Each structure stands twice: as C-alpha cells, then as structure tokens.
Image (cartoon, helix red, strand yellow):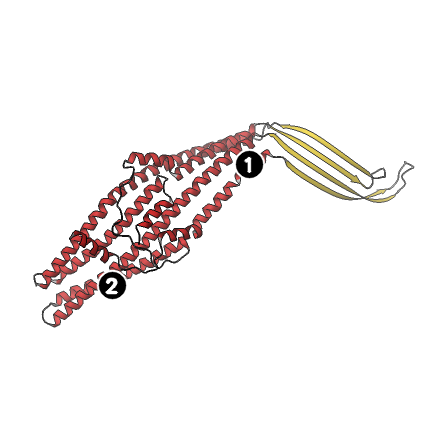
C-alpha cells in the first residue's frame, strides 16, 4: 500500500515533462562559456598572472637607444685666427647613445617579486572560488526553475480539482441536492487557486530569466527530480571533520590568507625605501658632427662603464609614513581574515545541520503528503454520503497541495544544502553536479 501510494504521489507531483528537457549539466556548460561574472573572474586572474613578469623585469637590464639630430647654423662675426674667416656655416650633428642599466641590488625589487607570487596565488584561489560559486549559482537557478515548474503544475492541478468541485456544487444545487453555501465556498476557493496559478506563472517566467542571466540561453523547462533519489547524510559524519576541512580548504579563506601575505610583503617593499641600491650602467655614445666651432667635422665614440651606489638619506619622512600606512592595512586584513574564518565556521555548521535535518524533513513531508491524500479521500467519501459539507473537502484539497509543494521544495533545499556544505568545505566540484544530474530525469 505504501509503495503504491508513493508512486501515486510522484505521478501527481511531477506532471509529464517535455521530451526535450534541458539538463543541469548542459546548463552548467553554457554557464562556464557565457556567464559574465565568471568570465570577469577569469580576466582578473589573467591580469594578475602578469604581475610575476612585471616583477621579474626589475632584475633584468634596461636597454635604451637614444638618437638626436641637430641642425646648427654657425655665424663667425670676427676671428683673430687667420685660418677662420668671418662667414656663415650650416652643419648637422647626429648623436646616438646606447644605455644599459643592470640592477645589482634593489631591495624593493626583491620584495616586489615575492609579493607578486602571493598576489598570483591569491588570484588562483579567487578564480577557483568563482568556479565553485558558478557551479552553485547555476545549480540553484536550475533547481529554482524546477521548483517553479512543479509549483505551476501543482497550482494548475489544484485549480482544476477545485473547478471540478465547483461544477459539481452547481450541478447538485440545480438538482436540489446541494446548498448555495457549498457553491459559494467552492467559488471562493476557485478564485484563490486562480490567483495562485497566476503567481506561479510569474515565478516560472522569472526563474527562466534568472537561469538565462547565467547561461545566456532561455530554458523552457528543466528536468525533474526522481522520486527515489538517495537521501544521504554528510560524510564524514562528524561536524569536527567538516570544520577542519573547511578551515584548511575553503577557497575564500585561503584567498584571505594570501591577501594577508600580500599585505605583509607590501610593508617589506615599502621599508626597502630605506635601503641603498646598486646598479651597473653602460653608456656607449657616438657623435657625428659636420663641423665644429673651429671648423672641420668629427666622429667621436665614447664608452663609459659605471657602478652607481645610491643611498637614500632623507625624503621628508615619506618612506616611514607609507610604511606605517601599510602596517595599518595589514592589521585590517588580519581582522578580515578572522571575520572570514568565523563566517566559514558558522556556514559549515549551518549547512551540515541543514543537510542532516533535510533528510528527516523530506521523509516527514513525504509522509505528510500520503496522510493528506488519505484524509482527502476520506472527506470526499463523507461528503458524498452527506455527513459533511463541501468546505472540509476544499480545505483538505488545499492542505494536500500545500503539502506537495512543501515536499517538493524540501527535496531541492536538501540538495542545495548538500552542495553548499561542500562549497564551504572547499571540496565542491563538477563531479558533484554529475551525481545530482544522475538523480534527474
């Protein structure tokens, strides 16, 4: 009896689906390709990845080639040198200078390179967190679409059931077997079910647009959740293990840890303003002049090799001031890390308990649907026998459809809590989506 009743509940809850229902995995694939938020995170990661090359450039030589061309008009008004008489001379001068600067020691460059590594590592964690967040957002939007589809189907079924009761009440009144009160009760309840159906249609339209916002594709409807999908408690079965895993693997928390390292390196980089720097400079200069003050052209090449030591002595206290600023920002990041740690701890506990409670809630609501169905059947029989009025039957119908909606929603909430627990623990992956997809049809 119980098995057949569950089959009836499943058939009543999930109306026939379209043959071309679009799957959850298809939605996720489209989301990875089209979601602007995720693509922006990818672009940010690619931008951050260039910081190592930028920092490495501080260790490499800087080479510059300068070229100058000068046109000179020289007028000799008088000269005691018998070789040069008065007159006007025009001549060009070309100067080519090759400069090479090779850093030997720059404390700031060393610290900037270490900081760049931390920034890239932080960006990696942030991108991985964005991937998990995309997976969860897509699944949430898809399950909301499924729930909205179920809600509309139930609202339509309830309206049709109440409509049949209204028609029956009218016929019985015409035949002199019913009362005007029964007809009024049925008419009032029918209007309520019409309003619920309108609301359900609006929610379904919005759910489609919410999924389209992520995937770039309008899904007419999704799959449905199989009746006998497994209800599993979190594994491992102890909250302490989940808290430990979340503390070590939560991607947002790890990104905060790297942000703290970036802030620490920023202090060291700014402190480097107190350190001397050593550079090797090579200058090769060639000057070709068509004439000189004393007449005649010249071609001159000069090569200089210089080791330059620069020692900062005083810059108005700027280095100390910016270092103190960085120290205060480091303290701020420490507090943000602690805040993130507490948030992760709370979320882990909430989703763990929510998943555990969800298992019992789904089973309880399933039994509620079965009991409400039996209650409706009994009241319908009593009404036909003339023992009760139509109103208790209408109330039983309302309670049955409310129980069905609650039962359907509890199943989706259970799945989302399970995914959120894995996300906060940092273990959520596409394989988890595959396992949920296997429960859909």
Kind of element beneath mark 2 = helix
Number of the label disc, if any, that sits on residue 55:
1
Q: Which residue is mark 2?
A: 194
Name the spot of residue 171 as percent of width and height, x first.
14, 70
Residue at image x 30%, y 56%? 148
Name the spot of residue 361 as percent of width and height, x first.
22, 46
Residue at image x 76%, y 35%? 301
The answer to the question of whether label 1 and label 2 lie on touching residues, with beta carbons closer than 8 A, is: no
Residue at image x 38%, y 58%? 218
Q: Quadrant of residue 273?
A: top right
Between residue 231 and residue 144, name the one nearer to us: 231
Q: Could you tell me how many numbered marks the image carries?
A: 2
In the rendered view of the protein, which quadrant contains the C terminus?
Answer: bottom left
Q: Counting other residues with Cα less than 10 Å from the Cα at mark 1, is it few (<14), some (14-19), or many (20 or more)?
A: many
Nearer to us of marks 1 and 2 is 1
Between residue 206 and residue 12, name the one nearer to us: 12
CA gap between label 1 and label 2 equals 66 Å
Q: Quadrant of residue 183?
A: bottom left
């Amino acid at each position: 009896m119980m098995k057949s009743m569950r089959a009836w509940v499943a058939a009543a809850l999930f109306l026939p689906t379209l043959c071309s229902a679009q799957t959850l995995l298809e939605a996720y694939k489209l989301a990875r390709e089209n979601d602007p938020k995720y693509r922006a995170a990818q672009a940010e990661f690619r931008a951050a990845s260039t910081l190592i090359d930028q920092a490495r450039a501080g260790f490499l030589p800087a080479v510059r080639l300068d070229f100058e061309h000068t046109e000179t008009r020289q007028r000799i008004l008088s000269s005691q040198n018998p070789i040069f008489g008065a007159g006007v001379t025009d001549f060009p001068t070309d100067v080519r200078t090759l400069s090479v600067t090779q850093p030997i020691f720059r404390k700031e460059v060393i610290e900037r390179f270490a900081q760049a590594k931390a920034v890239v590592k932080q960006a990696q964690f942030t991108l991985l967190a964005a991937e998990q967040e995309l997976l969860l957002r897509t699944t949430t939007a898809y399950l909301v679409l499924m729930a909205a589809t179920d809600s509309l189907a139930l609202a339509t079924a309830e309206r049709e059931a109440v409509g049949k009761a209204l028609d029956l009440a009218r016929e019985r009144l015409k035949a002199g077997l019913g009362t005007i009160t029964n007809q009024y009760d049925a008419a009032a309840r029918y209007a309520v079910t019409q309003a619920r159906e309108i609301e359900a249609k609006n929610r379904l339209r919005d759910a489609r647009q919410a999924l389209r916002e992520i995937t770039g594709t309008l899904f007419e409807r999704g799959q449905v959740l199989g009746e006998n999908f497994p209800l599993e408690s979190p594994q491992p079965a102890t909250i302490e293990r989940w808290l430990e895993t979340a503390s070590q693997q939560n991607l947002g928390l790890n990104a905060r840890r790297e942000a703290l390292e970036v802030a620490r390196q920023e202090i060291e980089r700014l402190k480097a303003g107190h350190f001397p720097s050593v550079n090797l400079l090579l200058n090769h200069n060639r000057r070709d002049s068509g004439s000189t003050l004393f007449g005649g052209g010249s071609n001159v090449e000069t090569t200089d090799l210089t080791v330059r030591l620069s020692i900062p002595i005083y810059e108005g206290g700027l280095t100390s001031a910016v270092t103190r600023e960085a120290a205060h920002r480091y303290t701020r990041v420490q507090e943000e890390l602690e805040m993130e740690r507490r948030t992760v701890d709370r979320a882990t506990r909430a989703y763990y308990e929510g998943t555990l409670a969800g298992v019992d809630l789904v089973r309880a609501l399933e039994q509620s649907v079965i009991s409400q169905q039996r209650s409706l059947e009994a009241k319908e029989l009593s009404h036909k026998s003339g023992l009760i009025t139509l109103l208790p039957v209408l109330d039983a119908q309302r309670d049955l459809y409310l129980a069905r909606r609650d039962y359907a929603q509890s199943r989706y909430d259970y799945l989302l809590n399970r995914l959120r627990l894995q996300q906060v623990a940092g273990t959520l992956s596409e394989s988890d989506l595959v396992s949920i997809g296997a429960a859909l049809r």
